[in-house]
Image (cartoon, grey):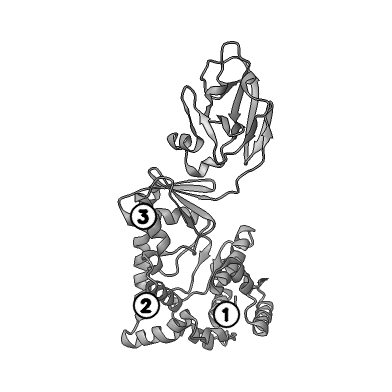
Amino acid sequence: MSGGGDSMALLHYLCRHAEAYDIQLSAVHCEHGIRGEASAADGAFVREICEAWGVPLFMFSADCPALAAARKVSLETAARQFRYGCFDRLLKEGKADLIATAHHMGDNAETVLFNIARGASLTGAGGISDRPGYIRPLLSVTKGEILRYLQENGVACRTDETNADEHITRNAIRLQVLPALEKIVPGASGGIARFARLAQEDDALLYELAAPLVAAGEGHAKVFFSEKKPLFRRACLSALKGMGVEKDYTAAHLEALCALKTAKNGERLSMPGNIWAVREYDGVAFYRARPREEREIPFTLGRFFLAGREFCAEECPARRAGESGYAALEKIPASAVFRTRREGDVFRKFGGGAKKLKEYLIDRKIPRRERDGLILLAAGKEILAVLGVEISDRIRVDEGSRVVRLALIK
């Protein structure tokens, strides 16, 4: 509820029809910290209107220029993230069931043209899209119809002077491109709206077909390769969006992800949101980089926590030599510690020769994203056990050994 004509028309209409629609209304005003006194006056106007019309009001404020600088995004992006963060908070807290935005047909046409001009995919050509918890009641209404509604019903509104700044790309499209297009092709905005709706329907089908390519986990996802690039790209986008990346990706990011199919295993790319994309055997794995755990825990019996994992070392009855996870207690050096992997680590697998731990993990096809989180039992650079995977030949169980079980709990 900015106080501008679009949001005023929407609030007025919904207030008039609240009983018929069986809805209870509240309004949300987000002050972006961009326009100084004019912005404060907008907030005061909205407060007065809501008091006069008996509409509860939620008000939020933020320094969006500072947010944009801190996040290294455009001011428009920072403002949008702030607004939708406020809306999502109200939905999450149960203070609203739905958020109604005042986007109209012209806004949608502007968005479609802007996206196409930047080389967007079918998703961008679909314009303003649906999202859970949101409705767009005016999306089929023209700006002219909104202006007539305001005039006929005597609804006052505020004017945001920045909307007239043609140095802002979207403003230039709205003020110059769309009017010129309407002169050449009358009803162009309506035609663009129909095109956007069809593009959304086609895009939704492609996303549905791409869904089986995505295997999502807690904090990570994997996308399996496909010969059909449109499906693979959408699967990658689904994985990124599932990890919270909504707007900051580019076409270059998607092309680079497609190129991973011919890259070496383990090749990785930096994605928005502190996410890595790694070529992992038959697909691409997405995960957030975690700081490597440098702490060491001296070996002893008991239960421990390290690198977000719980594990144990506990004495147990005798086991056969080579049985996974069981070691000879007397063979573990007093200097042994539990830790995560380091450069130069060496592992002597059970019944085999020594090799670099990195090479051993590659042989075992343990994904790169999981390697820094592995719990190791080490004596210097020698790795005695990779918990949950294998013990070293050096600490194998012999006849009469005291047996210790080295295992991950979770």
Distance from disc 3 to disc 2, alpha carbons, whole Å, reads: 38 Å
Of residues 3 and 269, the one nearer the viewer is: 269
Tell which circle, 1 or 2, labels the residue nearer the N-terminal end: 1
In this picture, is 363 found above or below 104?
above
Q: Tell me the residue at 43%/74% (across/down).
A: 111
Within 10 Å of disc 1 (Cα), the crowding (few <14, some 14-19, many 20+) is many
The residue type indicated by label 3 comes to Ala
* Mark 2 surroundings: few (<14), some (14-19) or many (≥20) residues within 10 A: some
In the rendered image, which residue does mark 3 sit on? 259
Q: Label 1 belongs to which residue? A: 8
Q: Is residue 29 visible?
A: no
Distance Cα–Cα, label 1 vs label 3: 48 Å
Q: State which tag comes first along the sequence, 3 or 2.
A: 2
Q: Is residue 355 found left or right of 311 in the rendered image? A: left
Question: In the rendered structure, which amino acid carries the disc numbered 1?
Answer: Met
Residue corresponding to mark 2 = 190
Find numbered disc 3 in the image and state the secondary structure of the residue it sits on.
helix
Q: Toward the viewer: 406 or 64?
A: 406
- The quadrant holding residue 105 is bottom left
**Picture coordinates of residue 409, whole percent (x, y):** 60, 32
Name the residue located 53 percent from the left edge and 15 percent from the top edge.
320
Q: Give coordinates of residue 297: x percent, y percent.
A: 68, 35
Q: Residue at x 53, y 58 (%)?
A: 273
Q: What is the quadrant of the C terminus in the image? A: top right
Residue 52 in the image: x percent, y percent?
68, 80
As measured in the structure, the alpha-carbon distance from the residue carrying label 1 to the one carrying label 2 is 23 Å
Mark 1 and mark 3 lie on one chain; the one further toward the N terminus is 1
Image quadrant assignment for residue 7: bottom right
Q: Is residue 209 above or below residue 171?
A: above
